[in-house]
Image (cartoon, rainbow, N blue to C red):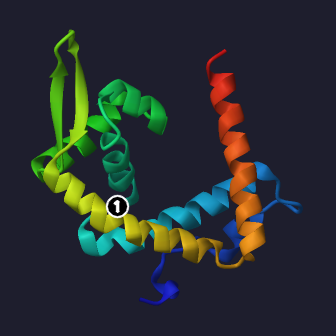
Amino acid sequence: MARSTRPSPPDRAVAALQPEKPGLWYCNFKIWLEAKWLLDRALAPLGLRSREYWLLALAGLGNYSQHEIAEQFGIDPSSLVAVLDTLERRGLLRRQRNPDDRRVQWVQRTEEGDRLFARALPRARRAEARQLSALSAADQTQLVTVMRKLVTSTKRRDKR
């Protein structure tokens, strides 16, 4: 599929939004947009979108509550319900009440979800490699290392 099929805003709108010297936030936003597009495209043959992939990834790590997942995604818990409902109807996730606190529902990947995630993971890795392909191997390593530092730093601030 040619890249030209991707919808894009008019050139003048893009030019108006682009700062003269792009900073972290602008660059991060543009990188995120490209990453989301690449991942959505890579996962489309599996009937997944990027947000569903990340839900499957998180749900495979153990007992996360809907509230914890919403926090990780930075969205309102009520916004998450529709996506969880869809994945549950497809048999990819299940919600289970926490036996110690009946108000809490854990989200867990099913065996079918495990199988689909196993098929999606190599596609996601190829999409990531495609995005990073403009950089040398050394630059890729350096970029990811620095980004991990920012993520770790953010986690520490969140706990204050």
- Label 1 secondary element: loop
Location of residue 16 by image quarter: bottom right
Q: Residue at x 18, y 50 (%)?
A: 92
Where residue 68 appears, as percent x and y from the top left, is: 39, 27
**Residue hosting label 1:** 49
Q: Pick the residue in front: 141 or 67.
A: 141
Where residue 131 appears, as percent x and y from the top left, is: 60, 72
How many numbered badges does the structure rendering display? 1
Where residue 23 appears, as percent x and y from the top left, is: 82, 53
Q: Which quadrant does the C terminus fall into?
A: top right
**Looking at the image, is 41 positioned above or below residue 103?**
below
Q: Pick the residue in front: 77 or 13.
A: 77
**Looking at the image, is 97 positioned above or below residue 39?**
above
Q: Which quadrant does the N terminus fall into?
A: bottom left
Say left or right for 16 vs 89: right
Q: Residue at x 71, y 67 (%)?
A: 140
As drawn, the residue found furthest toward the right would be 21
Location of residue 116 by image quarter: bottom left
